[in-house]
Amino acid sequence: MGRKEDNIKKATEVMHILPQIRNLCIAAHIDHGKTTLSDNLIAGAGMMSNELAGAARVLDFDEQESARGITINAASASMVHSVDGTDFLINLIDTPGHVDFGGDVTRAMRAVDGCFILACAVEGPMPQTETVVRQALKEKVKPVLFINKVDRLINELKVTPEDMLKRFEETIIKVNKLIRQFAPEEKKKEWQVSVMDGTVAFGSAYHNWGITIPYMKKSGVSMTEIFEYCNNEDQKTLAQKAPVHEVLLDMAVTKLPGPVEAQPYRIPNIWNGDLESEIGKAMVSCDPDAELAMMITKIWMDPHAGEVAVGRIYSGSINQGESVYAIGAAKPERVQQVSMMVGGDRITVPKVVAGNIAAVTGIRSAAAGVTLSRDKDFVPFEAIRHYSDPVVTVAVEPKSMKDLPKFIDALRSLAKADASLQVTTNQETGEALLAGMGELHLEITVYRIEEEQNIKVKVSPPIVVYREGIQGSNRGHSFEGKSPNRHNRFFFEIEALPEDVVSALRSGDLGDGPVRSGDAKETGNKFGELGMDRDTMRKIYAIKGTNVLVNDTKGIQNLHETRELIIEAFNEVCVKGPIADEPVQGMYVRLVDAKLHEDAIHRGPAQTIPAVRNGIKGAMMRARTVILEPMQKAFISVPNDWLGQVTREVTTRRGIIEDMPSEGNVTTVVGVIPIAETFGFSNDIRAASQGRAVWNTENLGFEILPPQLFDKVVGEIRQRKGLKPEPNPESYYSD
C-alpha cells in the first residue's frame, strides 16, 4: 500500500498550494462509464491496483451500488498527479447518471470548478447528458468532453476510420450546441470544446486507454495506430502507450480552472452577499487565512463516525476541534474530525484550507446545502436548486412500534443526506410519507432504512403526487372571503401565470418567500421584463414556489398590519389546494379590495387567516381549478421484431408516441407517459421485448389531467386522505 500512503502525504502538502488544486466531477448519462473511469483515475494515481481498475469500482462502495451496477451516491476522492514535474492535487467527484438521483449531480456541481462530460461513442449524447450539462453550466462549471467506449465502435459496429471521425464530430457538435444554449453569456464562446485545443479526449475507460491531440504530440501515438490496436484486439499495449488516467488528468490540470481562477466568476453566481465586503473579497480571491466559508454538498452515514458532512471550502480553513456555526442553527458546534476523502476511506488531517473539498464530522445540524462559518451572521450561499420535484410518494412505517424512535432518527438523517427526498411524518401514527424522484429512488431509500439502520418497515404501494393549477380566471368577478366575525372582508382575483414566468420562478431567478417592501420595486421590475404589468407587480407581497401574491388595493387603512397574516393564509393554500389538498402551482393571486374592522382586536389571526384562505380557495373554484399530473419522457430502443409489443405497452399506459427514429434494425420509441401509469413499466417492457429493449426516462413536469379522469382521480386522492369524496363547491367558501 506504499503508493497510497505516499500519495496521501503528498496530497496534504499540495493542498496548501492553491494554483495546484483542481476540483472536478465526472457527469454523464447512466451506463456511459463514469465509475469505471474514476476507478482508472484513482488507480493511475496509485490508490488501487491497475488490474482491479474498472472492476473494483472503488467509488461505488455502497453495497446497493455494487449489486445494481449503478451509481447512487456522488462519491469523492483526492489524488495527486504530476505534470512536468509539478504535483497537482485533484479532488474528484463521481456522480450518478440515473434520472432518480439527479439531485446528487446538482449538489456535486456546487463543489467543483470543472467537469468531465462523458459521452458514449456508440450512443452519443443522451437525454441525461443534456440534463447534466445544463446543471454544470448553471453552476458555472467549465466542461471538457471525453468520448468513451471507442473500442465498441471499432469492434462491435465495425466502422471505418472515416466513419469513426464523422461520429466523433457529430457528438462534439451536439455537446457544443448544449454549451452554447446553457452557458453563461460571457463563457459561451470560450467554453466550446474542440479536438484541436485538447478539450476533447477519446478512449475506453474499460480498457484503460485514452488520447487527446496534445498527448498524441507528446507520445507519438497516431489515430491510425489506435484504430489498428483496437482492430487487432490489442488494447493492453495501447493502455501502456496512452494510459487514460494520464491523458485525462493532464487535461484536467491544463484545461480546467483551479479555485483561484474559478472563484472570481463562480462566487457572484452562488452567493448573494456584498462582494465588496471583507468576506466577499476573501471568497473571490480564495484566501486561506480569512473567515471560514464552507458549503456542505453531501452528507453520508459512516457506521462508525455517524454523519459525515462533505463540502467545498471557499475561504478560510476548517480545523479539527474548533467551533463553527451551521448557518441557521442556534448554537455553534465542535468539529470533531477533518479529513480528505479517498473512495471509501477518510484520511484525517489537522486542517483543510480554502479551494479544497473536505469531510467533517461532529456538526449535527449540517445538511446538504447548509453553509458553515465561524461568523453566525454570515450570509449563506444560495440554495441549491433541483431540476425536478419529487413526484412519487410511499407511506412507510416500522413493523414494530419499539423501533419508532430509531425510525424517526433514521428518517431525519436520510432527509439531511438527500435534499431531493421529502420526508413528512404523522407524529400520532408514526407513519412517514417519503416523496422521491421515482420508484428506484424510494426503493433504495427503503433499503437503507432496512439494511443500514436495521429497522423492518411496511411500505405502501407508490402514490403519485399531483398538483392543482388554474385554467381560467375570475378577473372583474372577484370572490369575497369573510372572517368568522363578519367584520373583515377580502376580495380576490386569480389567474394562471404565463409559462415563462413559472419557469423563471422554478429556477429561482425571482426569489422565494415574503418580499420585503424595499425589494418589491426591484422584484416587480424582474416580472415586468417577463411581460407582466410592472406597476402591479411592484406591489408584490410574497412568492411561494411558483405562486405569486400581489396586493392590488388602493388606500385601505390598516392593511399593512394584516400583511403577515395574509401571506400566511396564502402559503397555506399553496400547500393544500381546494380540490384535493394537493400543492398548487403557477397561480397568480391579486388582493383587489378589503374591508377591515378599525379595531385591531377584531382582525387578529383567528379572523384574518380563515377569511383570506376562504377568499383565495373560493376565487380558485370560480377561476376553474384543474388537476395537473406529473409526466415522464421515455426513450426506448428496441430491435424492430419487438417494436409492436413495445409501442402497445406505451399506448396502453395513456402514453403518446412523439417520434420513432430508426437506425439499422433498431428503432427508438420516444414517448410521453403519465408517471401514474409507469409503475411496473420496467418489468412489462422487459417481458414485451424479451429483455432486448434499452430505455431511459426523464421527468417532464406537469400537464393537465384529461377531463374524463378528473372525477376518478380526485375521488381516489380525497378518499386516501380521509376527506369527503367531492371537493367543496364555490358556495362553501362564501358563507
Image: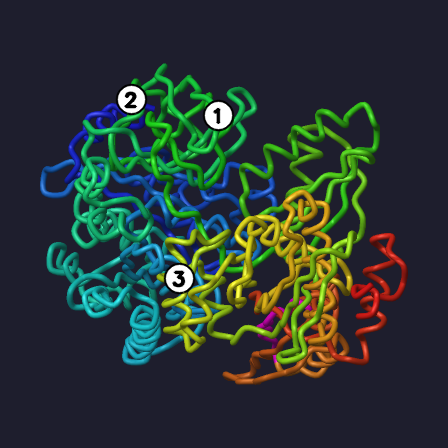
Q: Is residue 38 left or right of residue 484?
A: left
Find numbered disc 2 in the image and state the secondary structure of the residue it sits on.
strand
Dominant SS of magenta comes to strand
Q: Which residue is label 3 attached to?
A: 523
Q: Is residue 689 above or below residue 285?
A: below
Find numbered disc 1 in the image and state the secondary structure of the residue it sits on.
loop
Looking at the picture, how far across and down is residue 596, in whole percent?
A: 64, 56
Q: Is residue 701 visible?
A: no
Give the spatial CA distance, label 1 vs label 3. Answer: 30 Å
The image's colouring method is rainbow
Residue that protrudes farthest toward the front in the picture: 598
Give the spatial CA distance, label 1 vs label 2. Answer: 25 Å
Q: Amino acid at mark 1?
A: Ala
Magenta region, residue range: 629-639
Q: Please say if the residues under marks 2 and 3 sit with CB atoms less than 8 Å apart.
A: no
Give the spatial CA distance, label 2 vs label 3. Answer: 42 Å
Q: Quadrant of residue 204?
A: bottom left
The mark that comes first in sequence, 1 or 2, is: 1
- The total of numbered circles placed on residues is 3
Q: Is residue 219 above or below residue 493?
A: above
Q: Which residue is label 2 attached to?
A: 351
Q: Is residue 158 visible?
A: yes
Q: Assess whether residue 407 is covered by the magenta stretch.
A: no
